[in-house]
Image (spheres, rainbow, N blue to C red):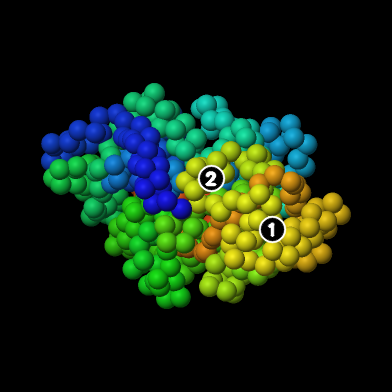
């Protein structure tokens, strides 16, 4: 991969994402030492934006504080899909999915560590979440499958485009239309309580570093997880020392730490997920949808070694067992044509390209005969609809006679399943299990929803479902 080419593309991407910068009057310093609103939302990722839009729908005044220069957070990086069961798009594609299947997949994928009432809420409200986004203008008409799912339920833009940017663009446009006050480069530093233990607002720093206070009856924590802080994730799992991360630089657990100082209860902090297909050294994540659409994983001997659409922890561990602790994601023109997201990887020159399996193997210093046999065997499994080696349940397409591609990948820290303990109203609980009045939490700042492993596509469902609940409940409470 040519470094200058990569950097120019990254720069172009950053320029593009500046359109996602804060809206409302948030781009200017407040200049005020104290102000007042109904609800303060900390974090303008997908969860925070969803909560803001819903709270505004319910008639509440909202201020959203975002410490980064742009809105979107980790949601902006999501590419695979948003999981939902029972949508009109599934019905149009004759996909026989049910909420029960979705619930069972989620519980099983998280090793039954997910809190059942939260998982039930996630799966029951998932179709409603997708339809809510579609009503706001999102394109989620393409439906595919991600790891750990028993049915196709990952909704994404037409042609398999990246879903995260579509969701953020949709929510940001809705927020702008509603004139919601979103302040980028404004960092919340403390959540305030009154002498009765009720939430009364936040302290923050504006973009010039000046401190100010916002009085509010409710605060919604939507700051994301702590996957961008090696210090924090190593604190809870020493085995992850030295791992790369797919997270944006702002994912440092701020909301969790602020709430912890108020006596909030933490749960499952040790449950940290790695994503198996991340480009070594640069941390660029290759979406799980590439495997879902038919790609396979091979080692340096040119052989498959795992069910490619198994859960992320299983696939990650299998890669770490290979030589040099990396593998190659292998696909062809058939897979490339099926998923729009792949074009970005080709453009960034992340892939080694060959005219055939044998040609590709030579470029990878791999046994040509072995890779040719691997591809031939896999094609046979697709035809027979049975993976005799690893039991892969879904093999949507054979490899053909066009070009072949290989991207070297390794696991990196991706999602922190642990966080603040909440109830089904998204209220944050203290150490005694009682709710802290006026304090809500959503998204990756929350623990207990995904258990011991998060299924691809569930985080986006999580942030919309619980973001809407938090926005509505906080608005009701302040009334």
Residue found at the very far top of the displayed protein: 177
Q: Judge left or right: residue 372 versus residue 156.
A: right
Q: Residue at x 30, y 51 (%)?
A: 198
Q: Residue at x 32, y 61 (%)?
A: 257
Characterize the local packing of mark 2: few (<14), some (14-19) or many (20 or more) Cα atoms within 10 angstroms.
some
70 or 380, which is in the foreground?
380
The residue labelled by disc 1 is 358
On the image, which quarter does residue 154 sit in?
top right
Where is residue 308 drawn, in percent x and y? 67, 59
Where is residue 437 drawn, in percent x and y? 36, 50
Characterize the local packing of mark 1: few (<14), some (14-19) or many (20 or more) Cα atoms within 10 angstroms.
some
Where is residue 140 drawn, in percent x and y? 59, 34
371 or 38, which is in the foreground?
371
Q: Judge left or right: residue 154 versus residue 433.
A: right
Q: Quarter of the image for the C terminus: give it.
A: top left
Label 2 vs 1, first from the N-terminus: 2
Q: Judge left or right: residue 404 versus residue 210.
A: right
The residue labelled by disc 2 is 346
């Amino acid at each position: 991969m040519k470094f200058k080419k990569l950097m120019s593309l990254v720069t172009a991407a950053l320029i593009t994402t500046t359109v996602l910068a804060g809206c409302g009057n948030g781009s200017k310093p407040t200049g005020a030492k104290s102000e007042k609103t109904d609800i303060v939302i900390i974090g303008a990722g997908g969860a925070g934006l969803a909560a803001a839009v819903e709270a505004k729908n319910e008639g509440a005044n909202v201020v959203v504080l975002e410490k980064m220069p742009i809105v979107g957070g980790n949601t902006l990086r999501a590419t695979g899909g948003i999981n939902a069961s029972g949508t009109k798009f599934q019905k149009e594609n004759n996909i026989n999915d049910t909420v029960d299947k979705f619930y069972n997949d989620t519980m099983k994928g998280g090793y039954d560590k997910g809190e059942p009432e939260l998982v039930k809420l996630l799966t029951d409200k998932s179709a409603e979440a997708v339809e809510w986004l579609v009503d706001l203008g999102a394109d989620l008409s393409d439906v595919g499958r991600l790891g750990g799912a028993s049915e196709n339920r990952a909704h994404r833009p037409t042609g398999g485009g990246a879903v995260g940017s579509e969701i953020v663009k949709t929510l940001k446009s809705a927020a702008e239309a509603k004139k919601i006050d979103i302040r980028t480069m404004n960092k919340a530093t403390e959540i305030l309580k009154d002498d009765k233990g009720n939430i009364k607002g936040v302290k923050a720093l504006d973009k010039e570093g000046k401190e100010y206070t916002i009085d509010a009856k409710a605060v919604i924590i939507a700051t994301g997880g702590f996957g961008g802080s090696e210090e924090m994730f190593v604190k809870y799992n020493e085995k992850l020392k030295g791992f790369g991360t797919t997270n944006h630089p702002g994912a440092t657990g701020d909301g969790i730490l602020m709430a912890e100082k108020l006596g909030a209860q933490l749960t499952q902090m040790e449950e940290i997920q790695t994503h198996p297909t991340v480009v070594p050294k640069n941390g660029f994540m290759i979406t799980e949808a590439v495997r879902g659409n038919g790609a396979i994983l091979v080692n340096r001997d040119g052989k498959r070694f795992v069910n490619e659409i198994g859960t992320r922890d299983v696939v990650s561990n299998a890669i770490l067992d290979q030589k040099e602790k990396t593998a190659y994601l292998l696909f062809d023109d058939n897979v490339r044509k099926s998923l729009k997201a792949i074009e970005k990887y080709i453009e960034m020159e992340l892939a080694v390209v060959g005219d055939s399996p044998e040609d590709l193997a030579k470029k990878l210093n791999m046994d040509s005969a072995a890779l040719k046999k691997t591809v031939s065997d896999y094609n046979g499994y697709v035809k027979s609809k049975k993976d005799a080696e690893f039991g892969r349940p879904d093999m949507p397409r054979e490899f053909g006679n066009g070009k072949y591609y290989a991207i070297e990948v390794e696991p990196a820290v991706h999602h922190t399943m642990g966080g603040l303990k909440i109830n089904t109203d998204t209220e944050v609980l203290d150490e005694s299990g009682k709710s802290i009045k006026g304090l809500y939490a959503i998204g990756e700042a929350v623990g207990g929803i995904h258990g011991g492993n998060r299924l691809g596509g569930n985080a986006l469902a999580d942030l919309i479902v619980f973001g809407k609940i938090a926005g509505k409940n906080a608005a009701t409470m302040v009334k």
